[in-house]
């Protein structure tokens, strides 16, 4: 009797399963994790999970698709880190709006230093709603972030100080609309606290006790959390607009790949 050696197809299945698990750690709107993965020996499929779509706040599924784009980015990085060369086909089935992407591999490869660094940061990044430190962000750092957006097929525009008043008004108005809409409020009440699937939603310790001092208001969840924001003021914060050349599901998916390390 001899032990069977793992075949390459077995190795690929393990790699795809690992990539799906890593992809599940991506940031998503309200931490809804609105995706489903199907791993086989021939590929890894990413599908939208409409049961977790915010029907009131995201009726078109834009935020859902952006969230799935972040998961796609993480899964691709996991394959790079595992020594594979992934190939991504977006919107692989025109008959299904839920089929967002399919990942296959073209062989073995070595991850670049940048890919390795980004992979290592997956378990480090988290949303932090406290004020930023009182330290100016270096221009070189902003340029690196802008280039990273370009590398993923998106554009990033840094806002000048005179633009912040308009952004602050828009953010405040969006908060008012969300809190005044009964259906959107119910969605927030479900995903922020309450009963929900394990490891999903926004925990209370990630929601500020009081609104932090910032030039642009953050998201108002309509209820206080337990996060102590301190007494600082985010005067040194830099705000940017991330955008793509189009406004179709494929563009939303591409934008999500750049949002993967955002808070």
Image (tube, rainbow, N blue to C red):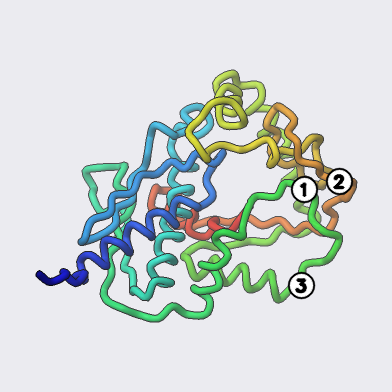
Label 2 packing within 10 angstroms: few (<14), some (14-19), many (20+): few
Q: Which residue is mark 1?
A: 130
Residue found at x 63% / y 28%: 178
Q: CA distance from mark 3 to mark 2?
A: 24 Å
In the current view of this chain or complex, which residue is farthest to the top? 182
In the image, 231: left or right of 145? right
The image quadrant of residue 10 is: bottom left
3D distance between C-alphas at marks 1 and 2: 8 Å
Vertical relation: 146 (above or below) 262? below
In this view, the residue in front, 148 or 49, is: 49
Quarter-wise, where is residue 186 in the image? top right
Which one is in front in this view, the residue at disc 3 or the one at disc 2?
2
Which residue corresponds to the image point at 49% horizontal and 57% vertical from the top-left?
244
Pointer 3 or 1: first along the chain: 1
The x and y percentages for residue 142 are 68, 69
For disc 3, the marked residue is: 138
The residue where tag 2 is placed is 230
Mark 3–mark 1 distance (CA, rounded to whole Å): 20 Å
- Where is residue 23? Give x, y as percent: 43, 55
The first of marks 1 and 2 along the sequence is 1
Q: How busy is the neighbourhood of tag 1: few (under 14 within 10 Å), some, or many (20 plus)?
A: many
Q: Residue at x 75, y 36 (%)?
A: 226
Please state which of the two labelled residues, at mark 3 or mark 1, is closer to the viewer. Answer: 1
| Residue 148 tag number | none
Labels 1 & 2 near each other (Cβ < 8 A)? yes
Q: Could you tell me which secondary element the residue under label 3 belongs to?
A: loop
- Asked whether, in this view, residue 231 is left or right of residue 76, the answer is right
The structure residue drawn at horizontal position 84% and vertical position 44%, both measured from the top left corner, is: 213
Foreground pick, 150 / 221: 221
């Amino acid at each position: 009797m001899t032990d069977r050696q793992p075949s390459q197809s077995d190795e690929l299945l393990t790699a795809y399963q690992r990539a799906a698990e890593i992809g599940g750690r991506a940031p998503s709107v309200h931490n809804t994790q609105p995706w489903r993965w199907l791993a086989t020996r021939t590929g890894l499929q990413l599908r939208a999970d409409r049961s977790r779509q915010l029907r009131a706040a995201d009726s078109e599924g834009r935020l859902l698709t952006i969230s799935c784009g972040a998961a796609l980015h993480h899964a691709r990085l996991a394959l790079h880190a595992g020594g594979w060369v992934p190939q991504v086909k977006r919107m692989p089935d025109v008959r299904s709006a839920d089929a967002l992407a399919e990942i296959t591999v073209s062989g073995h490869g070595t991850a670049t230093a940048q890919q390795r660094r980004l992979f290592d940061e997956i378990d480090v990044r988290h949303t932090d709603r406290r004020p930023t430190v009182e330290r100016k962000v270096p221009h070189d750092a902003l340029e690196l972030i802008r280039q990273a957006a370009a590398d993923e097929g998106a554009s990033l525009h840094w806002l000048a100080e005179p633009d912040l008043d308009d952004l602050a008004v828009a953010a405040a108005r969006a908060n008012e609309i969300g809190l005044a809409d009964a259906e959107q409020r119910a969605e927030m009440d479900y995903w922020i606290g309450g009963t929900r699937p394990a490891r999903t939603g926004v925990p209370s310790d990630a929601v500020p006790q009081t609104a932090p001092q910032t030039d642009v208001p953050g998201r108002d969840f309509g209820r206080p959390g337990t996060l102590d924001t301190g007494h600082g003021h985010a005067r040194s914060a830099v705000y940017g607009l991330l955008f793509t050349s189009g406004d179709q599901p494929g563009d939303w998916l591409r934008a999500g790949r750049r949002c993967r390390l955002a808070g």
